[in-house]
Amino acid sequence: MKRIISMPYLLFSAVFIVVPLLMVAYFAFTDGDGNFTMQYVANVAQYTNIFIRSVWLAAVATVVCIIIAYPVAMILSRIDVSYQSTVLMIVMLPMWMNFLLRTYAWMTILGNNGLINSFLGLFGLGPYRLLNTQGAVILGMVYDYLPFMILPVYNVIVKIDKSIIDAAHDLGCSSFQTVVKIVMPLSLPGVMSGITMVFVPAISTFIISRMLGGGGNLLIGDLIEMQFLGNSYNPNLGAAMSLVLMVIVLLIMVILNQFDDEDTVLM
């Protein structure tokens, strides 16, 4: 009976996950005539600097999201239960807007004649170059993916047994010690989930880097997209880049999962 019930999910996984992955692997290791070759995978090494830039910017954006999301999640978990759903809705509200519109909004804010430079101009400052920089790309990533960090961290913190925190206070722990020694270790699974949900889309994004970073801040997502559109059409190289990116992401996730051991969290 269980097998029958699980068949639709297995079929969905096969059609929309396994088959596309096999197609990516096929194009990555074949040429235009369908012959096996390692040429395209080897050519990916030419773009090492773009891979490094993508990993670096995604990692910085993820760290910034953690720094912002953790105190927000702590505050959310401590406010009155009747207000938590309202505040969560406010956190999620920007995600109801189209992704492109949100990014366009930041172009207006960060432009030479944008809101920030116009405000600074009132004090005789600027205009400063805020758009088409790596900082603008990181800002776009943080803004777009921050809710994906807040929600999993909040979901874990809010479920921590209050009696554990009370016991820590009774044993002489200060509020800071309670957060560092009790709350943070117990909330680590939520943090790891948030890192995955932020880092993976951030490293592969192309809209944010194109619109906020300009042509001088290409990320691997932009490079992959270029292989499937325009005059540089080369699906085999694009598939090879995608495959290498998947391997890099998997390796990073495996390393991060080493810090998410249940025994370590409960110590």
Image: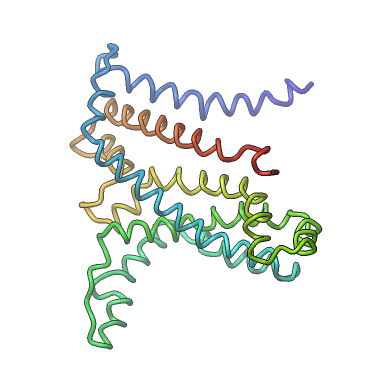
Classify residue 160 as left or right of residue 120.
right
- Name the colouring of the figure: rainbow
Residue most toward the front? 172
Residue 212 location (% of width, % of height): 30, 59
In the picture shown, does residue 95 fall above or below 190?
below
The residue depicted at 29 percent of the width and 28 percent of the height is: 235
Instruction: Please tell me whether residue 163 is drawn above or below residue 113 in the rendered image.
Output: above
Q: In which quarter of the image is residue 82?
A: bottom right
Q: In this view, does 106 lie above or below 199?
A: below
The one of 196 and 105 positioned closer to us in this rendering = 196
Residue farthest to the bottom, as pictured: 123
The x, y position of residue 149, in whole percent, is 54, 54
**On-image quarter of the N terminus:** top right
Residue at 27% across, 56% down: 213
Q: How many marks?
A: 0
Describe residue 264's horizontal placement relative to residue 159 as left or right.
left
Between residues 88 and 166, which one lies in front from this camera angle? 166
Which residue sits at x=61%, y=61%? 73
On screen, residue 90 above or below 189: below
Relative placement, left or right, of 180 versus 126 is: right
Q: Residue furthest left?
A: 231
Q: Where is residue 174 in the image (x, y as percent from the top left)?
A: 68, 66
Left or right, 85 with reference to 150: right
Q: Observer-nearest residue: 174 or 251?
A: 174
- Image quarter where the C terminus lies is top right
Q: Which residue is drawn at 23% across and 82% down?
A: 125
Foreground: 135 or 91? 135
The location of residue 56, given as percent across then percent down, is 35, 47
